[in-house]
Every structure is written in structure tokens, then in C-alpha cells.
Image (tube, helix red, strand yellow):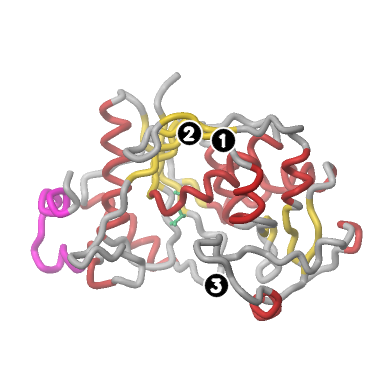
Amino acid sequence: MTFRTRFAPSPTGPLHLGHAYSAILAHDMARAAGGEFLLRMENTDRERSKAKWEALILEDLAWLGLSWSEPVLRQSDNLDSYEAPLARLREMGLLYPCNCSRKDIRAATAAPQEGAFPDLYPGTCKHRDVSSWQPGDALRLHMDRALARFGGNLPGFTETGEKNAGFHRIEAATALSRIGDVVLYRKDDAVIAYFLASALDDVAQQITHVVRGEDLFDFTAIQVLLLALLGLPVPVYHHHLLIRDESGRRLAKRDDARAISLFRADGATPKDIREKVGL
Ligand code: GLU
């Protein structure tokens, strides 16, 4: 099986050092394995995704010397492909509608647990039947029912990253206490949410190895669960360490000072960027 990996940025800001590391690492791993590197724009968040960021990301990646073996997959061009899998989850009785606002959720979650998944949902709408869905409602995964489908034999994935290499079986207690009933269909712009779209696109692009930051480790459990529920192949995952600044703080998108475009403007070379990120 050919090694195929991808870089899947969300065009909601400039490419910074952390992204560059992720992209170069994935690209180099593919080249070393005689495989393929693909690019996907995860732009289902219509409000925050901007054409100008996409253009800049493409320019920066090309400047870094990266090339991809197939045309860029844009999630906004692929929306139809998410419908059947979503309908399947619905038929399986694994979705429920939810009209809670972020504010409602915060109010219901009196004491957020330390280290909990940021959106751990308190279950306010869990009693609702999917047939009561109305335009403007989101759809959430009923995590307890999803886990029950596996009858104790939960799926897992192979990790090849620096930390925790080996096979990871999803743990029911962790899924319930850290992940919970994630949103799979968003009410704000009526599209499939990141978890499902990204996992489905990995299958559509025949990705064998997902290379991405360790900050997405919890997301992997959700995506593996979704793929297993849908009977789809689960790739191997490689979660890499994150690039941190001098004070050990992880770089975030808002750290525009680390934007590749600014290093470029200052006369840095692609080799300088590789050195900066330790590659
Ligand atoms: N689009 C996500 C992001 O930019 C990453 C997706 C992934 O690597 O699976 O944070």
C-alpha cells in the first residue's frame, strides 16, 4: 500500500512556524517512504475561512518547496459527499438535534473539569429524538449509544509519533468524560463539522498516515470512532510534538509574528525555516 499523507490547514489565518513544521514533516515522511503528499483546505467554517488566507498558505507552502501529487481538495467543493455518511449515522440512531447556544452550554457546565475536552456537552438536548430536528438545530453524536454499538470491543488506531507509539484502543470512560457528544453538523452554517468532514476526507483521499500535531490527539479518538461506526478504513496516525516559543508556550494561529510570510519578508530562506523548526 502506498504511503499517502496530507496537510490539512484551515484557511483562517496565516501559515505559521507550527504549521510549516507539520507540513514539511508530512511531506518529508511521504518522500522518504516513496509515497504521496496531498493538500486539503478545511474551509467548512464559512465565517472564518478566507480566500486571502488560502492564497497565502498556498504561496507559503510552494515557497517552502512543497508540492502535492493531486489537485487541492477543498471541503467547500465536497459538501455533498458528507451527506450519505451523516444520514447513515442518523439511521443508526446515533444523532440528536441540539439548539443550545455556547452560552447555554457554559451555564449548564457549572464546574468545567480540568483538562476536559473544551466543548464537553452537558447533555441538555440528549432526550430529543432526531425526528424533532428543525432548521437551525445542530446534530450531535450520542456518545453512549455510539460506544454501545461496539459491545465492549472498541476500535483503536496505530500511533507512530514520538509519544505513545503503539496501538491505542478507544476507552469508553475517556470518550464520555473528555469528548462527549460532539457536534457533527453545525447549526450556524449548516455544514458538517470538522470531525466528520476531516475523517471522511482522509478516507476519500486514501490517506494511509495522518501526520498532525499532538494537540489533535483527542480528535483522533472521535474520528476513529466515526470511521469505525461507518465501517470505513482507519488510517495510521502520527502525532508530532508541537513547536513552542522560547518560553515553552505552544504557537497558536494568532501568533502572527511567527507567520511564514513575515519570515519571508525579512529575507529568510526555506532552509532557515527548516532549521528553526528543527528539521
Ligand atoms: N484543519 C485542522 C487545523 O488546521 C487540522 C486538521 C487535521 O490535521 O486533521 O487545525
- What secondary structure prevails in the magenta region? helix
> Left of 170 or right of it: where is 59?
left
Residue at figure coordinates x 81%, y 68% from the top left: 135
Q: Marks 3 and 2, how far apart in space? A: 28 Å
Residue position marked by numbered label 3 in the rendering:
47
Q: Amino acid at mark 1?
A: Val
Q: Marks 3 and 1, how far apart in space? A: 26 Å
Which SS class for mark 3? loop
* Residues in magenta, as a range: 261-276
Q: Could you tell which of marks 3 and 1 lies nearer the N-terminus?
A: 3
Q: Is 179 rendered above or below residue 93?
A: below
Residue 170 numbered mark, or none: none
x then y, percent, for residue 52: 38, 68
x then y, percent, for residue 224: 59, 39
Q: Residues within 10 Å of mark 3 (few under 14, many from 20)?
A: few
Residue position marked by numbered label 1 in the rendering:
203
